[in-house]
Image (cartoon, rainbow, N blue to C red):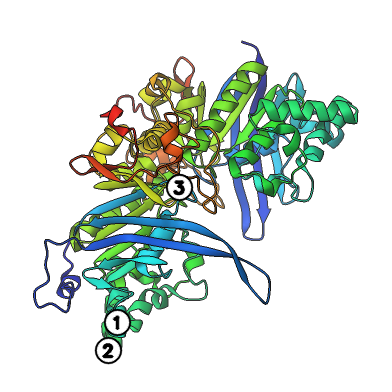
């Protein structure tokens, strides 16, 4: 498989009146062509900031990209001019967000919003763009597409709005689709519709996909490879089956143990992770998960373990081997 | 854990001399809540009715947890609020420990409000940002005159904070100084302050991170064990509902379409809507996910302003026949304790 995107040592910080927030602290990963990668973590773990840094969507200031390289088709996304980025965003790399209501312009019709990228990026004329827009809405399963094209975002339900977002994202046939918690605001039956749609589109268009989520259940249903983030670090990376069957980081183990299961009879009480997610105003010297980890030892406070390979395509950042452990 | 002070007050003073402990604590009978849709600024005309809750009935035993699940707009939150009298029901009644809020006198209404409490979804919006934790947690004590001396009050607040796992030293802090999980603990402490028998938990964990959700759920379970609480647990997270509830009711467009014991419902759902809902729940197991058959429903939930005729689910139902658009199916028991409202549910038995 060819590499589509290669990110090395990405560091993003925010300078706020309260101090510097260490949001992303040296993230490196690769994405292959036509691959589905999931990035999992709790709020504030840096999963969205990572992706927004790549697309130049971080406001600078207060943000600052301290270091890093992100090669996409040989071009370093982090060092492109705003003009060059404009050609990539929306055309080669598209992004959909959690809340479709705030990402759609409420005073413009859907027609205007979809045809905009078709006309700027693909150079279509008005008639052709309209035809293509109808086709796209059809593709994402919006009934009566020609009529609905002239409606405004508030006239669509949450699930339908997310379909519109996907149609807009797919308008220019991107090579990579980044989806930032696109189903979090939706009900489970609608979530299932959207996931099914995204998978079908990915297959038809042969694009790669990065799916950002906090829901380990959703990840199990769609990803090929998974990255687990905590406090701005990647703590584990594995193929999806390996991550669930053979987790190698105490945080992943704890997260899986904290999940109730709809497919099993109730066992013991849930295993909760003590404490709260970390304060990102302090750059942690040791392992960021140490204050909440059951296996914590002296060396965990002294130094942060680097990602190391523990099996084929399986990396973890822990001083210990937690293989087969039950927390 | 010993909670001596909390136990002293937990006998429910009712009008009858000896409270009947075998009767269900909570009884809801054909409860309806309709919201009028009006037009006009000065002369308001009613142009429609949103039938948010359209006739639901159930009981909850002492110490039991009933889960109320369904998609957004199905009326589960409205139902919880109407039971507690936060909305005045359009018709029907709900009683807790024999007290009916609509029929009761002023004193009895106060008693009802003391014994039936609520934990809200959003731990950010449900706490007054200008009040300290002390003021928030002691408000129910003040309203219900539950202390004689200032010392008694502050002891009780300290005890409540400890009970929910908060540091009593933080008593003079404001809500913004706490994390989401800690705020939800403050909300729980406030609900417990008036020594309730019944608590409506309206999506108490959906705003929290996964690692924090487990903490709050375990807290709710511990409190139930120690204090003998009865819960109505309103949620859309079906995995968590299976974990925490004893019985589960599934709502669709203002009606209960299926109700059964937890494992019976999750293992043998008889209503096509419950089946679709359960098949859409993400399961954190990739192999199982690939193997299972999903029922993907077409379209969205119809508007409760103008619900479909007959069975309200017939517009999205994979097994709908002609009769479904004409006759509304009644909720009937197909197995002991397993109720379902579908004309054709027998085929799944």
Residue under label 3: B209
In terms of image quadrants, where is residue A77? top right
Asked whether the beta carbons under mark 2 and mark 1 sit within 8 Å of each other, the answer is: yes
Give the Cα distance between marks 1 and 3.
33 Å
Query: Which is nearer the eye, B69 or B225?
Result: B69
Q: State the image coordinates of residue B216 (x, y, percent, origin top left).
A: 35, 53
Is B287 situated left or right of A47 in this image? left
Chain bearing tag 2 is B
Chain bearing tag 1 is B
Residue under label 1: B153
Residue under label 2: B149
Query: Which is nearer the eye, A247 or B258?
Result: B258
Classed neighbour count for the residue bearing mark 1: other residues with Cα under 10 Å, few (<14), some (14–19), many (≥20): some
Chain bearing tag 3 is B
Is the same chain shared between marks 2 and 1?
yes
Query: Which is nearer the eye, B182 or B323?
Result: B323
């Amino acid at each position: 498989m060819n590499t589509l995107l290669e990110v090395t040592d990405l560091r993003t910080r925010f300078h706020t009146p309260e101090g510097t927030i260490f949001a992303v602290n040296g993230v490196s990963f690769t994405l292959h062509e036509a691959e589905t990668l999931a990035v999992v973590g709790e709020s504030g773990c840096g999963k969205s900031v990572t992706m927004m840094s790549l697309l130049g969507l971080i406001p600078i200031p207060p943000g600052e990209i301290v270091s890093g390289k992100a090669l996409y088709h040989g071009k370093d996304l982090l060092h492109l001019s705003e003009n060059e980025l404009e050609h990539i965003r929306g055309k080669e790399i598209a992004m959909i967000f959690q809340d479709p209501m705030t990402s759609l312009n409420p005073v413009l019709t859907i027609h205007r919003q979809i045809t905009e990228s078709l006309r700027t990026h693909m150079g279509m004329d008005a008639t052709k763009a309209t035809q293509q827009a109808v086709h796209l809405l059809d593709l994402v399963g919006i009934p009566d597409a020609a009529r609905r094209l002239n409606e405004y975002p508030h006239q669509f339900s949450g699930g339908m709005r997310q379909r519109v977002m996907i149609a807009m994202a797919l308008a220019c046939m991107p090579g990579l689709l980044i989806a930032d918690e696109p189903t979090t605001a939706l009900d489970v039956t609608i979530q299932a519709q959207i996931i099914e749609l995204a998978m079908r589109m990915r297959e038809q268009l042969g694009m790669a996909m990065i799916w950002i989520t906090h829901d380990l259940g959703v990840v199990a249903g769609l990803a090929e490879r998974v990255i687990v983030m905590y406090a701005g670090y990647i703590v584990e990376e594995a193929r999806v089956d390996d991550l669930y069957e053979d987790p190698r980081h105490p945080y992943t183990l704890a997260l899986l143990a904290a999940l109730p299961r709809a497919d099993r009879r109730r066992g013991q009480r849930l295993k909760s992770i003590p404490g709260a997610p970390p304060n990102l105003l302090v750059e942690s010297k040791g392992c960021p998960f140490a204050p909440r980890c059951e296996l914590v030892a002296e060396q965990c406070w002294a130094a942060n373990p680097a990602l190391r390979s523990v099996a084929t395509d399986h990396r973890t950042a822990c001083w210990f081997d937690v293989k087969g452990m039950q927390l | 854990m010993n909670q001596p002070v909390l136990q002293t007050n937990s006998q429910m003073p009712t009008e009858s001399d000896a409270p009947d402990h075998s009767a269900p604590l909570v009884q809801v009978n054909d409860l309806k809540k309709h919201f009028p849709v009006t037009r006009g600024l000065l002369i308001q005309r009613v142009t429609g009715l949103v039938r948010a809750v359209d006739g639901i009935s159930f009981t909850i035993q002492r110490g039991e947890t009933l889960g109320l699940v369904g998609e957004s707009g199905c009326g589960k939150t409205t139902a919880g609020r109407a039971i507690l009298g936060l909305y005045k029901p359009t018709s029907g009644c709900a009683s807790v420990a024999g007290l009916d809020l609509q029929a009761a006198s002023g004193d009895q209404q106060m008693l009802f409000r003391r014994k039936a409490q609520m934990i809200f979804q959003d731990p950010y919006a449900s706490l007054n940002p200008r009040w300290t934790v002390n003021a928030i947690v002691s408000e129910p004590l003040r309203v219900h005159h539950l202390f004689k001396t200032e010392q008694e009050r502050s002891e009780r607040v300290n005890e409540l904070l400890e009970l929910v796992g908060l540091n009593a030293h933080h008593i003079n802090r404001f809500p913004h100084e706490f994390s989401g999980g800690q705020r939800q603990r403050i909300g729980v402490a406030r609900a417990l302050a008036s020594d309730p028998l019944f608590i409506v938990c309206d999506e108490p964990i959906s705003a929290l991170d996964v690692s924090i959700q487990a903490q709050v759920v375990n807290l709710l379970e511990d409190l139930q064990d120690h204090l003998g609480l009865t819960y109505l647990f309103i949620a859309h997270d079906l995995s968590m509902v299976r974990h925490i509830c004893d019985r589960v009711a599934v709502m669709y467009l203002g009606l209960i379409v299926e109700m059964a014991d937890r494992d019976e419902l999750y293992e043998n759902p008889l209503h096509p809507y419950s089946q679709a809902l359960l098949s859409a729940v993400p399961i954190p197991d990739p192999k199982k996910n690939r193997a299972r058959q999903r029922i993907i429903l077409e379209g969205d939930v119809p508007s409760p302003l103008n619900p479909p005729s007959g069975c309200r689910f017939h517009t999205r139902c994979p097994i709908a026949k002609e009769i479904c658009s004409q006759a509304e199916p009644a909720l009937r028991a197909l197995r002991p304790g397993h109720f379902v409202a579908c004309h054709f549910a027998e085929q799944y038995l």
